[in-house]
Image: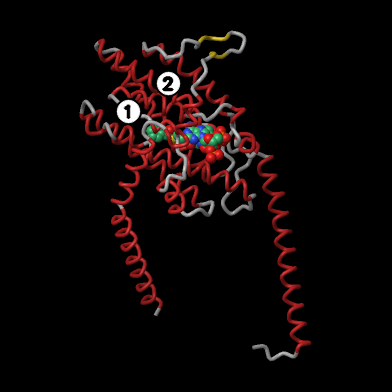
Amino acid sequence: MSTHTPALQALDHHDDAEQLAQQAREAADEAQVGWEQFERLIAEDMRVEPRDWMPADYRKTLVRQISQHAHSEIIGMQPEGNWITRAPSLKRKAVLMAKVQDEAGHGLYLYSAAETLGTPRDEVLDQLYSGRAKYSSIFNYPARTWADVGAIGWLVDGAAITNQVPLCRASYGPYGRAMVRICKEESFHQRQGWEILYALSHGTEAQKQMAQDAVNRTYGPALQMFGPPDDESPNSQQSMAWNIKRFSNDELRQRFVDMIVPQAEALGLTLPDPDLKWNEERGHYDYGALDWDEFFAVIKGEGPLNHQRLAHYRRARDEGAWVREAAAAYAAKQAQRRSAEETLLSA
Ligand code: FAQ
C-alpha cells in the first residue's frame, strides 16, 4: 500500500507515464535506426546477422523457408533410407548410408539456422509432428525400385542444387553459410545418383527399363520441387526483394531443364515429355505443362505417401524420446559438475 498522499501518488503516476512514453520513444528511434540499417544492408547486398535488427516479416519469412527446408531434409531421408538394407552391394550400401546421414546433417544445420532467429527447435519440430508444417512435395512419392534411388540422386538432388546454390548468397548470414556446406554435399549426392543410373542404363535390357521407369516417375515431381509457377507464387517477389531468393521458381526450373536434357542423353535415357525441345529464339528448352492440380493436392497432404511419411516421422520421434532425455540429463549433470569444480577452484 502506498504511503504517499493523493497528490504525491498523482505525481508517481505522472512519472510512470512519462517513463513509459520515453521508453516508447526510444524503442521507435531504435527501430527507425534498425530499419535504415537493414535497408542499407539489403541495398548493398550484404549479410544480415542474428544480432542485427530486422523487420518481423523478414524474420517470419526466413523461419518459414528455413524450417520447411529442414523438414524436407529430414522427411527426405525416408525414400532412400528404405533402400539401405536392400542396396545391391556393400559399396552401394556404404555410399547410400553416408548420403542419408548427410541429409540428417543438413536438417540439423538448418534447424540451428532457424534457432538463430529466436525460434526454438522444439517449436518447429512440433509443427512437423502435428502435420502443420510443409516439406518438399517430392518426398511424398514412393521409391519403388533401386533405380529410384538413382533417379532421386540425379534429379531430386540435382533440382535441390539448382535451387540451393543461389541460396548460398541469401541475405541472412546463418542460412547462406549453412547452404555452402549443404551444396558441396549435394553435388556428391547427385553424382552418386547419376552413377547408379549410368550403371543400370548400360546394363541388361531389364535394368535399362528399370532406370527409364524411375526417371519417368521422378521427372515431373522433380520439376515441381521449384514451387508453383511465378504467377501463383505468393512469396517470391518479397523474398527476392529481400535477397533471400535470388531467382524466381520458373527461372530455376528452366535452368534445371536446360541442365538435365544433355545429361539424359549421356545416360541414354529419355525424359518423359513429348513437348521438350530446343527453342533457338529463347536459347532454352521448351517443356510441357506440369500437373499443378497434383502438386497442390500433394502440398495439402493428399499425396501418395503423406500419411505414411508423417506416421514414420512421429514413430521415430516418439521412440527416440528417451535418447533426447538421457542426453539432456547427461548435459545437465556435466554442467553441474563443471560449476561445482569452478566454485571449488575459486574458493
Ligand atoms: N513442396 O510462394 P512460393 C532436398 C509451398 S531439399 C512443398 O513459391 P517460396 C534435399 C511454399 O512453401 C528440398 N511446398 O514459396 C534432399 C508456400 O507455402 P507457405 C527442399 C511447396 O517459399 C534431396 C507455397 O507453396 N528445398 O531436396 C513447394 O517463395 C534428396 C507457395 O509457394 C528447399 O526447401 C514444394 N515443392 O518458394 C533431401 C529449398 N514449393 O509457406 C533428401 C529452400 C512451394 O506460403 C533426399 N526453399 N511450396 O504456406 C525454397 O527455395 C523455397 O521455399 C521454394 C518455394 C522454392 C521451395
SS label for mark 2: helix
Q: Position of residue 47 (x, y in %)?
A: 60, 43
Q: Residue at x 59, y 8 (%)?
A: 280
For label 1, the residue is 143
Seen in the image, is 276 located left or right of residue 187? right
Q: Nearer the viewer, residue 228 or 102?
A: 228
Quarter of the rendering containing residue 189: top left
Q: Position of residue 242 (x, y in %)?
A: 63, 40
Farthest top residue in view: 280
Residue type at mark 1 is Ala
Q: Nearer the viewer, residue 190 or 68?
A: 68
Q: Residue at x 67, y 47 (%)?
A: 38
For label 2, the residue is 219
The quadrant of the picture occupied by the N terminus is: bottom right
**Residue 185 visible in the current orientation:** no
Residue type at mark 2 is Tyr
